[in-house]
Image (spheres, rainbow, N blue to C red):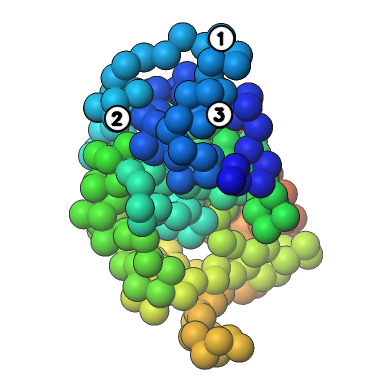
Amino acid sequence: MRNPGITDEMIIEMYKSGMPFKEMCPIVGLSDRAIRNVMYKHGIEMNRMQFSGQPRKHKVNEDFFKSWSHEMAWVLGLFITDGHVNRSTHSIVFAQKDERILKYIAKCMGAHYVLGAKGSTAKTPTLIINSKIIKKDLEKMGITSNKSFNVPFPDVPKEFLPSFIRGVIDGDGWVQKTGYVMNVTTGGRNFANGLLMVFKSWNLRSEITSETTKTNKVIYRVWVKGKYELPKLASIIYKDANDYYHYHKRERMEIHKQIIY
């Protein structure tokens, strides 16, 4: 049975992106035969390479996570906090309420813009990236399908730390409307400690708190507090941002900007 929210147009878009049938099936919820029937219905010419499940040329820069850049660091920060590694297929997924951010991610990665379906349980827009190589590169950094509670803090070169932290805050950061407090929530203790060390190295007033959820999982919040501290943090992480950030989070951090100049 077709997964909720999946339309013929979405199936065709996935197919035209070069995704093999074997990768489409779990996303769409149909057999390869049923997917072929959708193609026949709309008169779409089919490629035997995709039909047979043989390797195809991905419309994505598969070397994206092999070398550091400000764009790569930002996307990595977003993925660690708001991304998901598919356990059963060679794909990764980004989830963001702000679809503009997903479009920027696709642009950075040279990826075809393929959105996942929205349904009764999945209301947040998701960007699907299909690549065995990218999945393996993330696994080498310790980022796997069960990363939520054991993801390490990656070894980010100092030059690109601000962009990485910007991605982390864009992913799982919360900034108070009045501009006095910011925190990042994570289930990984090692990641939380690594984040705290970065904030401390930037001479920011920061701390970690923890709490236990109803399912007995411990979550950590890494805080930066103070009307002098948030503008200082903003001056560091938005230096090489271009347009790659959540606008409202930057605005809130910079409410008291004038007091540090």
Dot 2, how many residues are within 10 Å of its Cα: few (below 14), some (14-19), or many (20+)? some
- First of labels 2, 1 by sequence position: 1
Observer able to see residue 214:
yes
Under tag 3, what secondary structure? helix
Residue, x 48% and y 24% (percent of image)?
36
Under tag 1, what secondary structure? loop
Residue on which the image places disc 2: 53
- How far is disc 2 from disc 1 in space, using C-alphas? 21 Å
Q: Which label number is shown at residue 11?
A: 3
Residue, x 26% and y 55% (percent of image)?
139
Residue on which the image places disc 1: 43
- Residue 1 is left or right of residue 207, and the answer is right
Dot 3, how many residues are within 10 Å of its Cα: few (below 14), some (14-19), or many (20+)? many
- Residue 135 is left or right of residue 5, and the answer is left
- How far is disc 2 from disc 3 in space, using C-alphas? 16 Å
Q: Amino acid at mark 2?
A: Gly
Observer able to see residue 69:
no
Residue 84 drawn at (x, y percent): 45, 55
- First of labels 3, 1 by sequence position: 3
- Residue 205 is left or right of residue 6, and the answer is left
Dot 1, how many residues are within 10 Å of its Cα: few (below 14), some (14-19), or many (20+)? few
Q: Residue furthest right?
A: 178
Residue contact at pointers 3 and 1, CB within 8 angstroms: no
Q: Amino acid at mark 1?
A: Gly
* Tag count: 3
Residue, x 65% and y 54% (percent of image)?
122
Q: Which label number is shown at residue 161?
A: none
Query: Looking at this view, is 109 or 174 the one in front?
Result: 109
- First of labels 2, 3 by sequence position: 3
Q: Is residue 176 above or below residue 12?
A: below
Q: Is residue 240 above or below residue 122?
A: above
- How far is disc 3 from disc 1 in space, using C-alphas? 13 Å
